[in-house]
Amino acid sequence: MNHLKTFALLAMMTALFMGLGYLIGGATGMMIALLVAAGMNLFSYWNADKIVLKMYRAQVVDETHPNAVVRAYVADVKQMATDAGLPLPTITIIPNDQPNAFATGRNPQNAAVAATSGLLDMLTREEVRGVMAHELAHVKNRDTLTMTVTATVAGAIAMLANFALFFGGGDDRERPGGLIGTIALMLLAPMAAGLVQMAISRAREYEADRVGAEIANDPHALASALQKIEAYARGAVNVPAERNPATAHMFIINPLNGKGADNLFSTHPATGNRVRALMELGAKMGMNRRPAAAPVAARRPSTSVPVTPSTPTTPRGPWG
């Protein structure tokens, strides 16, 4: 099913790419766009994960890291991957104050997981485990290929649509619609590509929440983490994500400073809906409901070694 979903996604993206090529250069432009799209899809399959990790300056970490928090993070990811029957992923940290995380890679054998330094700074160990179990669920469900390829191709479609405004239309009869058609497709193609991302992302997040809660055996920790990440993320700007919005759907919570909602134009399900689903899952698993997380102001700052060379400006949860 996941392979079929990936194929359908790439086919839709390729069709949009070809449509823009036809508008810019007629039949010849469409064929060139087809070749470019095919090459891009192939390149994305093998390299999109590396591109995304480099884009966010992800740093590989292991058990020898001097920070005890990072060592615990690595140990937990490895233990949960083993319990889930997954190959050990590459484990990385992104130097960013916004708490967030994502997984990438074309298959479980070539997967990587990334947590921001802000995530490790602000959440408890149990909550970090819940978040990373969610990311391992993406790996287990083979969502990561869809996520990385979509981000790459959607960005290319937006770029080509901008080119269409300057080079498309005119009086050439091979380009139907002229300037009006060019402008229409310039606006509609990126929107269509975005809608494909969003629809797939929302369904994928609910399923990864469910599977991740089972991997960590703690739905309530993930629910608490989602609430904290949502609150913190609205107050901390993720500059690389703002510059590359096509990657927003990869994160566990939308990294862009906007309001999430379960609607047509949302990359993520509403956090409240996800929390309710996780609490219901916890009840089915016979777990008692946990009290709400303490507000930020009530949290006690930690004096542990910072995750990155620069000292974090926000308090870290009391684990490590």
Image: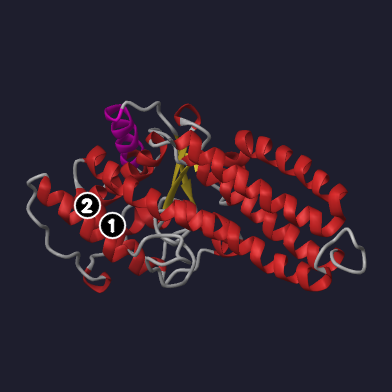
Query: How many residues crowd around disc 2 within 10 Å: few (fewer than 14), some, or many (20 or more)?
Result: many
Q: Nearer the viewer, residue 104 or 31?
A: 31
Residue 198, numbered label? none
Residue 221, numbered label? 2
Picture mark count:
2
- The residue tagged with tag 2: helix, strand or loop? helix
- Residue appearing at x 49%, y 66% in the figure: 256
In this rendering, would 224 be left or right of 39? left
Quarter of the image for residue 165 reads: bottom right
Please tell me whether residue 80 is drawn above or below residue 300 in the rendered image.
above
- Residue appearing at x 85%, y 61% in the figure: 175
Rounded to the nearest whole Å, what is the CA distance between mark 1 and mark 2? 6 Å
Residue on which the image places disc 1: 225
- The residue tagged with tag 1: helix, strand or loop? helix
Quarter of the image for residue 7 reads: top right
Residue 103's x, y, as percent? 45, 43
Label 1 amino acid?
A: Ala
- Residue appearing at x 59%, y 40% in the figure: 50
Q: Which residues are magenta?
A: 72-84
Q: Are marks 1 and 2 in contact (CB under 8 Å)?
A: yes
